[in-house]
Image (cartoon, rainbow, N blue to C red):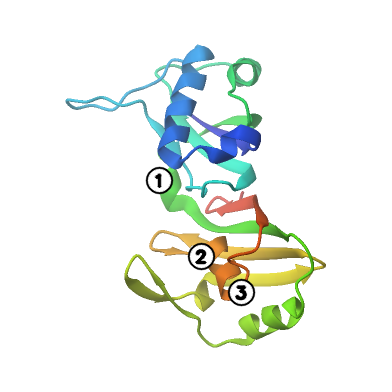
Amino acid sequence: MRVRITFSKTGPAKYSGHLDLHKTWERILRRAGLPLAYSHGFHPQPKIHLAAALPLGFTSECELVDVWLTESVNVEESVVELKRAASPGIGITEVREVAESLPPMQTLVRSADYVATVSGEVVGLDQRVADLISAESLPRERRGKKYDLRPLIESLALEGQVLRMRLAAREAATGRPEEVLDALGLAERQTAVHRARLFIDNGR
């Protein structure tokens, strides 16, 4: 059985990295008493797939994790047990069964919505946003590799001191909110970033 869990990541959990979050979920699932399935090989690992890495310090209300179980469970009862077993900052929103034949979760994500709240007034921020949107290209460099940020920005809007952005989140083509903030000259300013939605191939 394969189940998909939607969860929020706030409070102390926002400082957990991707690998730590994987271990956190293994502990939560064990505490909830769910029959975890394991991979084969010399070092079997629980079959837990997180959808997309979330940078340290970011919060989210839409994280997704797929979990494989060795036997079927009552989904409604599992929600109760998972909520009881959840670590601080991890909130269980939904648990549902999905087809085991679906591709890995990481390959299904297509884009993500982020909300970035900028502290204090920034003079001329509306013009910076307009200039970025109208730019034909935004050459950047990440880990020594050059790339164009502009095609990865699907939408960007400013509402007061709040930036709303939809960024590509495909394999080898992922837009990062911190790169957008840097391109806007906001890298040194305190900004709270929240992931509001993940878009995946099955339309959710």
Amino acid type indicated by mark 1: Pro
Q: Which residue is mark 3?
A: 185
Q: Residue at position x 69%, y 57% from top?
A: 115
Q: Identify the secondary structure beneath mark 3.
A: loop
Q: Residue at position x 58%, y 23% from top?
A: 87
Q: Identify the secondary structure beneath mark 1.
A: loop
User: Is residue 146 at least partly visible in the picture?
Assistant: yes
State left or right for residue 125 relative to residue 52: right
Residue 169, position in %: x, y? 50, 59
Q: Nearer the viewer, mark 1 or mark 3?
A: 3
User: Is residue 1 at least partly visible in the picture?
Assistant: no
Marks counted in the figure total: 3
Q: Earlier in the sequence, mark 1 or mark 2?
A: 1
Q: Earlier in the sequence, mark 3 or mark 2?
A: 2
Amino acid type indicated by mark 3: Gly
Residue 112, position in %: x, y? 59, 57
Amino acid type indicated by mark 2: Gly
| Quarter location, residue 153 | bottom right
Q: Which residue is mark 1?
A: 103
Calculate the distance from the C-alpha at mark 1 to the C-alpha at mark 2: 22 Å
Calculate the distance from the C-alpha at mark 1 to the C-alpha at mark 3: 38 Å
Question: In this rendering, is residue 92 above or below 58?
Answer: above
Q: Residue at position x 63%, y 44% from top?
A: 60
- Image quarter of the N terminus: top left
Mark 2 burial class by Cα count in 10 Å: few <14, some 14-19, many 20+: many
